[in-house]
Image (cartoon, rainbow, N blue to C red):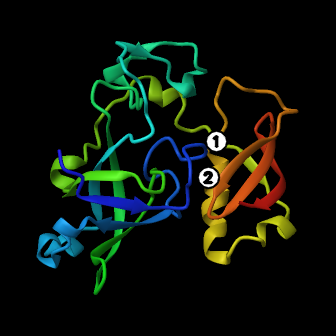
Amino acid sequence: MKIIAHIQTDFPDKFGIPRQSGLVQALKGRIVFEPEFRNPEAVRGLDAFSHIWLLWKFSESRKEHWSATVKPPRLGGKKRMGVFATRSPFRPNDIGLSSVRLEKVEITETEGAVLHVSGIDLMDGTPIYDIKPYIPIADCHPDATEGYTKETKEHRLSVKFPEELLCMYPEEKRSAILGVLEQDPRPTYFQDPERVYGVSFAGYDVKFQVDGDVLTVCDVCVL
């Protein structure tokens, strides 16, 4: 398959990225098409849709052999599920799927059509294979049921972010980093309250500790 675009986001690496799209609506990105696909005609009519589907490549997932079962992090990294019952990056084909809000379509002189999106769950530079409109009558199923994900979807942390540290971020980035931290970026199988973690976001490394359901930011460093 051809890579048609790449997304620009505030995440230089995987750690801290929400486990699903739409969980932190304040997270924004720019989708820039490859030169071959920069014809504005290719996105004609797309701006009438509020949401789009992104099919993308797990570019940082390196595994020579696939496994029939994986250990979802939100289940503590101990319980196995079938790979096709998860959204694990370790799949026979390294394809990801995200539903994001389309904020606007910008036509530029140098980059052609640029899509501004929010609610992203992708690392900076992630290759995009395809873009499709989200169609509510076909894509929304209010009566849908779910399996083990029902056990973990409400997990959020209370975040204590000292004002003098939070102010290091531009105002437009603050709700995004707070949302990222609320989602608990830690690997679920690490529960040491003394351990200091770090998540890289928008040019800063945010150091934090977690005790119970409370996350406390202890430092913010320029990357």
Q: Residues within 10 Å of mark 2 (few under 14, many from 20)?
A: many
Q: Earlier in the sequence, mark 1 or mark 2?
A: 2
In the image, residue 13 above or below residue 153:
below
**Which residue lies at the image location 45% right of the left edge and 44% below the top edge?**
20
The image quadrant that residue 205 belongs to is: bottom right
Q: Which residue is mark 1?
A: 185
Q: Position of residue 175 (x, y in %)?
A: 63, 65
Picture quarter with the C terminus: bottom right
Taking the image as shown, residue 49 lies to the left or right of residue 194, namely left
Residue farthest toward the bottom in the current orientation of the protein: 109
Does the CB distance between marks 1 and 2 fall below 8 Å? Answer: yes
Taking the image as shown, residue 20 lies to the left or right of residue 75, namely left
Q: Which residue is mark 2?
A: 180
Q: Position of residue 73 (x, y in %)?
A: 55, 26
Q: Position of residue 32 (x, y in %)?
A: 33, 68
Element at badge 2? Answer: helix
For the residues labelled 1 and 2, the Cα–Cα distance comes to 7 Å
Element at badge 1? Answer: loop
**Which residue lies at the image location 56% right of the left edge and 48% below the top edge?**
13
Picture quarter with the N terminus: top left
Depth check, front residue: 190 or 35: 35
Q: Residues within 10 Å of mark 1 (few under 14, many from 20)?
A: some
The image quadrant that residue 39 belongs to is: bottom left
- Please, what is the three-letter code of the amino acid marked with disc 1? Pro
- Please, what is the three-letter code of the amino acid marked with disc 2? Val
Depth check, front residue: 133 or 116: 116
**Which residue lies at the image location 21% right of the left edge and 48% below the top edge?**
139
Depth check, front residue: 137 or 214: 214
In the image, residue 150 above or below residue 160:
above
